[in-house]
Amino acid sequence: MTEDPHVPRPREHELPDGGLAVSSHWVHGTRDATTVASEDTELYRLLLDILYDQHVPDTMPARLATECEDLVEVRETVADVHRARNGIDGRDYGLSYLKAVTQAIDDYRDREPLRLVAVGCSGSKHEDAGAMPACERYKGSYWVGKRRYYETIGDDGRIISAEHAVLHPETPIEHYERTPGDLEGIPIDSDQRLPNGDDVTTLLDRWALDVHEQLSEWLQSAAGGVDPRDVELEVLLGRDYRDPLEDRGVFEALRIHGDLSVSFPFQTAEQAQGGMINQIDWMGDAVEAAMPIATDGGERDV
């Protein structure tokens, strides 16, 4: 099959610093050339994949990668059209090229958002000496329901703890006994500010700030980089944990480069209303509905 001469097929030459010299060639020589720094090559490769079958100039992916930090910024840049043209890294591109890139990115990003789940820790804990993974330290039917929920429903999960702020489930921890109420009213000397702008004056404030910072790091790790993902964050917390965090702006101030939605199913799902037993039942039903079921034709997800 004859290769389409109008889609990006740049020539590349690796530079000593790890970057790339990228050029567009035709029968009479070099039509256009630019360089891609080593730190921009990941975005450049992503754009080449996305624009593989689009009618855009050979060096346009390279210039976009040089101009922008990630795919979301690329989308914003090509949509910022002035008089049917846009200057990108010293080169003007017409409306047809800009529309082609916009549509290709929109098609690529039309995918399910990441579903992340943060659950509260458990008041019931194994008292074994030494450290063990957090997911093994906690016990009881309430905890088992939470663990099954984030493992089945979520693409990734974290645990919100009054002792440790935000925990990866496999992080080893020792036995402890602490609730947010234990931190309330205990003054500390700090020049930090909470997400809502208030001063950090108590241990409960500092805990809330730690939770915010560590949730932010998790979101960035899970959904950041040159290809940011949209995120649906489900927070499964009782009021004794949720309220002090929400009052200090912890969830409202969370930001990612894609779209972020934050929900609190324990307070909004009708079946979960009424306390721990109802929450356990709701989590169990949600997990069961998400599990593959056997059919005559094999397995399917419901």
Image (tube, helix red, strand yellow):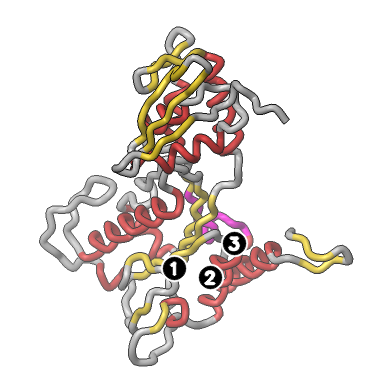
Which residue is disc 1 drawn over?
A: 120
Residue 130 spot, x, y in % from top left: 33, 89
**Residue 160 or 75: which is nearer the viewer?**
75
Q: Amino acid at mark 3?
A: Ile
Quick one: label 1 or label 3, which is nearer the N terminus? 1
Quarter location, residue 131: bottom left
Residue depth check, mark 1 versus mark 3: number of the one nearer the observer? 3
Q: CA distance from mark 2 to mark 3?
A: 10 Å
* Disc 2 packing (10 Å; few <14; some 14–19; many ≥20): many
Chain part drawn in magenta: 262-270
Look at the numbered disc 3 and give the secondary structure of its residue.
helix
Left or right: 11 as drawn, with respect to 130? right
Q: Amino acid at mark 1?
A: Gly
Q: Are marks 1 and 2 in contact (CB under 8 Å)?
A: yes
Quick one: label 2 or label 3, which is nearer the N terminus? 2
Q: CA distance from mark 1 to mark 2?
A: 8 Å
Residue 171 spot, x, y in % from top left: 38, 74
Q: Which mark is residue 146?
A: 2
Look at the numbered disc 1 and give the secondary structure of its residue.
strand
Q: Which mark is residue 153?
A: 3
Quarter location, residue 209: bottom left
Query: Residue at image x 50%, y 61%?
Result: 156
Q: Amino acid at mark 2?
A: Lys
Residue 32 spot, x, y in % from top left: 42, 20
Indicate whether residue 269 is drawn in magenta.
yes
* Disc 1 packing (10 Å; few <14; some 14–19; many ≥20): many
Residue depth check, mark 2 versus mark 3: number of the one nearer the observer? 3
Look at the numbered disc 2 and give the secondary structure of its residue.
helix
